[in-house]
Image: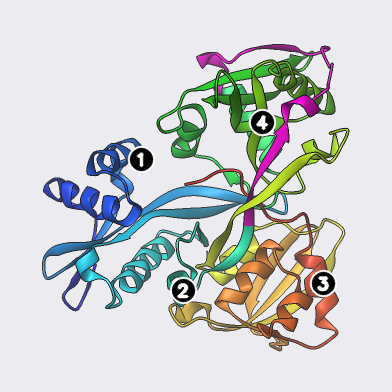
Amino acid sequence: METGKSEFGPPAAEEMSVVADILSQSFATSAQESAAALEKSGPANLRVLREAGEVVGTAFPIPMGQWYGGRRVAMAGVGGVGVAPSARGRGTATRLMQQVLQELRGKGFPLSVLYPSTQALYRRVGYEQAGSRFELRVQVQGLDFTERTLSLRPVKASDQAALQEVYRRHASSRPGYLDRGPYSWERMSNPRGETAHGFLVEGASGVEGYVYVVRRRQQGFMQELFLTDFVALTPAAARRLLSFLGDHRSLATEVAWTGSSADPLLFLLREQRYQAKLLFHWMLRVLDVPAALEARGYPAGLSGALHLEVEDELFPENRGRFLLEVEGGQGRVRRGGEGRVKLDIRTLAPLYTGFLSPEALRLAGALMTDDASMPVAAAMFSGAPPSMADMF
């Protein structure tokens, strides 16, 4: 794929050292660490931008999915965006991301998501804040649970299929959570530079929850327990896993994991002695307006229509009027309608995920609509705050 003197595509084998050098200078890691990360991540998904025959930019699109309204929406996460220092300040990163998005749309992905190192770049190509990732930190002394009715044991290799099914059931009801692929699962059980130990809890019907624990040494013999994954399908499983973590109180001071600030596990605690720290607002880009709106789920009892008018500088196919009709939890989109809700592709992202309400977007000057359309839009995109536990 070429643009003028630019060329976009997978790197050649002899270019991998240049890619590792760009990433090490972009993210302040050693070239050896960057090379190891590339090998672990899977070079097949890596993309580079060349100008005058030289690699000047890198990106790593990762096929995955997200859950919205109880339905899976195909999504490409983007990581590893780096630009050679000598190529900065001349629009290289913008050209790189435009090429990435063109390829992803061509492959049929309706959405793309990333964690921004800078918002200005990604807003230029149509991304906007659309969800959150929080670090939740609890004092081990406050985990005074004594649930023992479910059995607990270490995770075995043969448990992976059961764990993935438990996670799928857990994630499908949480807006924004990933439908994980091999790349994401590898990060849970084998985090970079650390060792995670997995434990699961079982009841009469099988696995009801699990946790992966990384023990981080603190001052003296004390530890912090960092959970790369923490899933409970039932109240008994949640209390059993919290009891297990509380059993570490002789050597551990705190337990930390990532996810939503409205995590139901926090509701089980006796006191509000925990911290919820914002790590990132992740950003989402709608690549295909009709496909994205039809792929997600909607409230089952809702029936209504929303008349949208969308602006998108990068994709002409996303421009114009669309009529979204919702019935029985599903949406159908066709061209046309009255264009009562006017917004650009960036504003569609937080509306789509439920990160910001239509009223909030109207107050910010990002959405223009009539009063009659406001409650319809609010009802269609209502739900729990969109969040993500995973990093990529």
Count of numbered labels shown in the rendering:
4
**Mark 3 = which residue?**
304
Tell me the crowding category of disc 1: few under 14, some 14 to 19, or many 20 or more residues within 10 angstroms, Cα based: some
Q: Are marks 4 and 1 in contact (CB under 8 Å)?
A: no
Residue 106, image x and y in percent?
Answer: 39, 64
Q: Secondary structure at mark 3?
A: strand
| Cα–Cα gap, marks 2 and 1 | 26 Å
Q: Which of the two labelled residues, at mark 1 and mark 3, occupies the earlier sequence position?
A: 1
Which residues, given as a range, are shown in magenta?
132-160
Residue 214, above or below 18 = above
| Cα–Cα gap, marks 3 and 4 | 44 Å
As for residue 255 lying within the magenta part, the answer is: no
Tell me the crowding category of disc 3: few under 14, some 14 to 19, or many 20 or more residues within 10 angstroms, Cα based: few
The amino acid sitting under disc 3 is: Gly
Residue 47, image x and y in percent?
Answer: 28, 56
Residue 171, image x and y in percent?
Answer: 67, 41
Q: Indicate which disc residue 120 carries.
A: 2
Residue 350, image x and y in percent?
Answer: 65, 68
| Cα–Cα gap, marks 4 and 2 | 34 Å
**Mark 4 = which residue?**
255
Q: Which of the two labelled residues, at mark 2 and mark 3, occupies the earlier sequence position?
A: 2
| Cα–Cα gap, marks 1 and 3 | 43 Å
Q: Secondary structure at mark 4?
A: strand
Residue 353, above or below 44 = below
The amino acid sitting under disc 4 is: Val
Residue at 68 percent across and 42 percent down: it is 136
Mark 4 or 1: in front is 4
The residue sitting at the front extreme is 220
Q: Which of the two labelled residues, at mark 4 and mark 2, occupies the earlier sequence position?
A: 2
Tell me the crowding category of disc 2: few under 14, some 14 to 19, or many 20 or more residues within 10 angstroms, Cα based: few
